[in-house]
Structures are given as C-alpha cells and as structure tokens.
Amino acid sequence: MKDHFMVVKRPVITEKTTVLAESGNKVVFQVDINANKKEIKKAISNIFNVEVINVNTIKIKGKKRRVKQQEGKKPDWKKAIVTLKEGDKIEFFEGVK
C-alpha cells in the first residue's frame, strides 16, 4: 500500500482549474504516474477529509526540449480531476486578498 502523500504530489492551479473549482466543485492534482483511481480517491479523502464522488485521470506526455545541440524531454506525468461531494471544498489560498 502506498503512502497517501506519495500518491498526491501537488495541486495544479491554473485559470482553467480555478473555474472548474468554482463552478463544478472539481479539484485538479498532479499524482503519481502509477497510481490508479481507487488509490487517488482514498488518498484525497484521507488527506483533506472530504468525500470524493468521481476521479478522472489523464496521462500527459512530456514535451521535447532542446538546448544548443543537446535534446532532452520533460518527464511524463498524470493529472487527476477529482469531483467532490456538494458542500465539500478544498481551499489552497485561504485568506489571500
């Protein structure tokens, strides 16, 4: 069994994800690439004490980068869109004006 803090790496905070959070009660996280939906659901509910209704996952391929003659690639990662129960909320910026 994986540690819950190893499954959930960080929240993804963009303009699009803040609109999702406000309108659809959905929160987006970067998660471990090998984590499945059941592990993600359990980790989010235990870390933030909320009830998770649904989890959608997306694998994102890393972009190719080039510096002079060296070619490289950013790592692949997995994004999880978590739908919370009506009334539950996860606040990342409490008290910021």
Image (cartoon, helix red, strand yellow):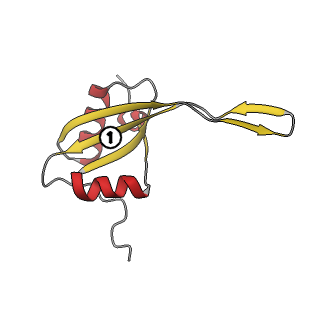
The spot of residue 94 in percent (x, y) is: 33, 67
| Element on which disc 1 rests | strand
Viewport quadrant of the C terminus: bottom left
- Compared with 96, 40 (above or below) is above
Relative horizontal placement of residue 71, taking residue 80 as reference (left or right): right
The spot of residue 16 in percent (x, y) is: 39, 54
The spot of residue 66 in percent (x, y) is: 77, 37
The spot of residue 84 in percent (x, y) is: 20, 45
- Residue at figure coordinates x 37%, y 64% from the top left: 93
Viewport quadrant of the N terminus: top left
Q: Which residue occupies the foreground of this view, 88 or 76?
A: 76
Relative horizontal placement of residue 27, taking residue 13 as reference (left or right): left
| Residue with the most extreme bottom position | 97
- Residue at figure coordinates x 78%, y 31% from the top left: 71
Q: Which residue occupies the foreground of this view, 23 or 54?
A: 23
* Number of other residues with Cα within 10 Å of mark 1, as a class: few under 14, some 14 to 19, many 20 or more: some
- Residue at figure coordinates x 35%, y 35% from the top left: 4
Number of dots carrying numbers = 1
- Residue at figure coordinates x 86%, y 40% from the top left: 68
Q: To which quarter of the image does residue 70 belong?
A: top right
Amino acid found under the numbered disc labelled 1:
Ile
Q: Badge 1 is on which residue? A: 81
Relative horizontal placement of residue 73, taking residue 69 as reference (left or right): left
| Residue with the most extreme left position | 86
